[in-house]
Image (cartoon, coloured by chain):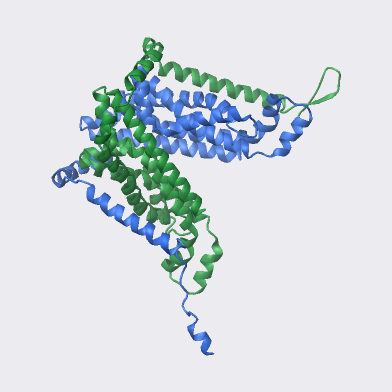
Chain colours: A green, B blue
Amino acid sequence: MPVTRAHDGLPEWRRSTPRQALLRWFGWLLLVALFVFCWRVMTQDTIWAYFWDAPNQAADIAARMMPPRWSYIDALWRAMWDTLAIATLGTVLGIVLATPVAFLAARNTRPSAALVRPVALVVIVASRSINSLIWALLLVTVLGPGVLAGIVAIALRSIGFIGKLLYEAIEEIDKKQVEAIQATGATSLQVVDYAVVPQVMPAFAGISVFRWDINIRESSVVGLVGAGGIGLNLEASLNTLAWSQVSLILLVILATVLVSEWVSAKVRAAII
Amino acid sequence: MSTLASYPTRWRRPPFIASAYWRWAIYGGALVYLVLAVGSVEVNWARLAEGLQRGGRLFAGFLTPDFVSRWSDIVIGMQESLTMTVTSTVAGILVSVPIGVGAARNLTPLPVYLACRAVIALSRTFQEVIIAILFVAMVGFGPLAGFLTLTFGTIDFLAKLLAEDIEDIDKGQVEAIRSTGGSWLQLLDYAVTPQVMPRLIGLSLYRLDINFRESAVVGIVGAGGIGATLNTALDRYEYDSAAAVLLLIILIVMAAEYGSGLIRARLQ
């Protein structure tokens, strides 16, 4: 225990030895230095006049946003339907693609540790490290603008998320049930069907609903790069500086997100 | 033994949703919705056929990424993304820690708790890109708008998880410090901090990772970073340069994930 002698010669408890304290201060110093350096590099081209003007700009935009142009809602029903379709179909496609990847990546179900598992892990990492908006950007150039590009973008991004959480759930299953099914002479597919699937099913449903909830948010913006949904209307309204339409769109997105969050919380509570 | 004849001899696994009524309602509703949704997707087959050729070129670009011809743009984009990531994570932590402490019910009175929870909810609702659009409109194009966006986004994640963590701490240590007559700040310093610090560091590293990934996106709407470089490369059909950017993003994310995994493993 780190103890120092105080002035009166009595031992006094300290949280750390002088050496630890010094190291800690040095660490903080390095962090501050890094922050200042990054800040200076980042803001070297910043025009500060714009920054100090930001409160005025914000007030101006807020004034233009109020009141929302309610009549524009008629143009948004179809866009909302598309947004929901992108999120839902994207999640379904993502689940279909992610499930085999997860089974190939999990240590206790993978067929080969040397070859298949690394490939599955690379698929998961690649899918996770690229944001759905970038996937959408790529797919719009390949598939053309529209809902299809949005669906595939959401699906490709979901593979990593669902795959990672699902393979972790598979690795945590109880071995006894697997051994019990193996003892009956079941084939490896039957083992997966009767011992692994029932154990991961609640986790799987929870993960899927959770990802669907995230995908609702993501699908509201993939339209910004042309991949369909309400983002298209947002982009068009922003480009024409129609801030009263922007505020209506933001309200609609807010309402959708709140509803989807409620649904997702209800379903997860019912499962667990 | 005739009474046993009616007893089922084959085992059937129980259905996932126990109530038959809800099972059919949910499955039926889902099926109807899926059919309607798939039916509403308009696919332009001619454009798709043409696109497959482009997809081939994009894929070829990944096999032969071109780091050289747009190197200076890539360096500028990466520099903006990386500096934005570091500054916004640090600023985000500085803002989130007080909010997180305020949102922990066992440390703060109800009005403070509700106010802090409201800030967290506000930061959660909108996708980062939408926040970025608003910040770009306010402070102009460039990485400063991205910095503000990512800082704002960090609050939701870090403050929420920190608050949950503080609510889960061991009460014994809090009572021990309280019984020595420690003030609220001393309580925070000696009873709460030691318990949540390892997790706070872990969460911060994880958020650093997320902020880098997000920094690659906010550039698409003009908030600086590597996303702008990527967008330009794709707009000019320079697929080999775009592939180089994407490969760099994946490499950095993998390195960051591996590094933060090592640090977190050492802390625990």
State the residue at coordinates (76%, 29%).
Answer: A2
Give coordinates of residue B155: x percent, y percent.
49, 29
Give coordinates of residue A134: x percent, y percent.
31, 36
The answer to which image quadrant residue B128 occupies is: top left
Q: Nearer the viewer, residue A135 or A69?
A: A69
Q: Nearer the viewer, residue B199 or B249?
A: B199
| Residue A22 visible, this angle | yes
State the residue at coordinates (43%, 70%).
Answer: A187
Is B31 positioned to the left or the right of A206 in the image? left
Count the marks: 0
The answer to which image quadrant residue B127 occupies is: top left
Give coordinates of residue B146: x percent, y percent.
39, 24
| Residue A115 visible, this angle | no
Is B136 positioned to the left or the right of B86 in the image? left
Give coordinates of residue B85: x percent, y percent.
44, 27
Work out which residue is located at the far left of the displayed protein and give it: B46
> Which corner quadrant holds the N terminus of chain A?
top right
Work out which residue is located at the far bottom of the displayed protein and give it: B1
Position of residue B167 relative to residue A203, above or below, is above
